[in-house]
Image (cartoon, helix red, strand yellow):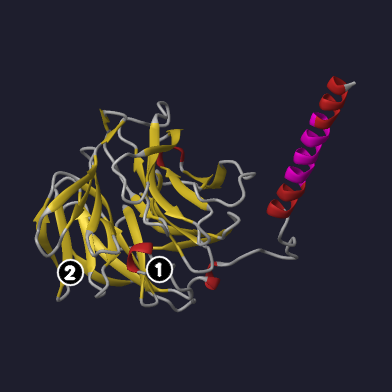
Amino acid sequence: MKKKGAILGTLVLIFTLVTASFVGAKALYESKAVPKGERHHITEIVKNNSKWEKVATGSGFMEGINFDRQGNIWMVSPPTGEIFTIKNGKVVTVNKTPMPIGAKFHKDGRLFITDGTGELYAYNSKTKKRETIVNSYKGKPLNGLNDLVFDEKGGIYFTEPMGSSATHPTGRVFYLPPNSKEAVLFSENIAYPNGIALSADGQRVYISEFNKNQILSVPSLSAADARETPFVFARFEGGIGPDGLTVDAEGNLYVAHFQAGEIVVVDSSGFDYGTIRLPEDAGTFVTNLAFYDGYLYITESLKNEVWRIKVNNTGLTPSGLK
């Protein structure tokens, strides 16, 4: 009788957990009413009369745009190893490192950079020195890195795409906990994980699966609800694939669509607002993007230009600038 009672108790527990899971999933996935008409239009993001403005022209392969606390623009160029800033409307080289690709400011003022050589390091703009943060996983060197994002705790999600492709999806995403030197494997088997961003509530990690022209959504390590599993968040047409990512305060995701000459905007449920096309005389290699003072700034790497456009929404403040 005791054995039967134990089995019955176990079954009741399993049923309760499964039921709770379905109830939670229903609340998670059915929280918004079905709209009567079209969900969105791009004019919710940019006004009809908004025009692109050219900010500066540089060289190399400009990428990794972001702002420091003083409002200065910083960028990098992987093939030339340059770290740039903009002074008086001109792109200026401030230093050279091996192969910088992604860049984000830490709260302490250092610029953290993901490098194509497989190293994540911190660059001090005052001393001109750089410090290796992590360059291995379980004793083995990391492959080339691409982009990074800080979470609210100061941990870092970063992408490792080198060597992966649509037919060889071996790319990985790692997480480096705050004040740690040991990276944790976060996600793998990705076809060239490129840009990366966190949702406005910090519950999801958005990953650009560049060689499959889509965005993946993966529950963050601090996600409160573990019922949500990784899924394809958005798919795109044309170009090659999504590069850099950024999020506004309302949770909308802005995607630099490489070789398409456009920014794609989707809401927090993955529904499309539309695209913000670059001017006809601009290039199509849109690599990265960042918000500042009511504008969306982008880097275009075919002609090595920085453009900006006035937007309706405020960008989510990067963790490193809070």
Residue 313 relative to residue 136: left or right: right
Q: Nearer the viewer, residue 13 or 255?
A: 13
Q: Main secondary structure of the magenta part?
A: helix
Residue 98 relative to residue 153: left or right: left
Quarter of the image containing the N terminus?
Answer: top right
Q: Nearer the viewer, residue 149 or 81?
A: 149
Quarter of the image containing the C terminus?
Answer: bottom left
Q: Decide whether residue 21 is among the magenta residues.
A: yes
Q: Is residue 12 above or below residue 311?
A: above
Residue that appears at 42% across and 26% down: 167
Q: Which mark is residue 204?
A: none
Q: Quadrant of residue 44?
A: bottom right
Of tags 2 and 1, the one toward the viewer is 1
Residue 94 relative to residue 172: left or right: left
Q: Which residues are magenta?
A: 10-22
In percent of width and height, residue 180 lies at: 31, 45
Residue 8 in sight here: yes
Give the amino acid type for the residue marked by disc 1 in the picture.
Thr
**In this figure, which residue is indicated by the disc labeled 1?**
317
In percent of width and height, residue 179 lies at: 31, 50
Q: Decide whether residue 1 is among the magenta residues.
A: no
Residue that appears at 23% across and 65% down: 109
- Of the numbered discs 2 and 1, the one sitting upstream in the chain is 2
In percent of width and height, residue 193 lies at: 39, 40
Q: Residues within 10 Å of mark 1 (few under 14, many from 20)?
A: some
**In this figure, which residue is indicated by the disc labeled 2?**
86
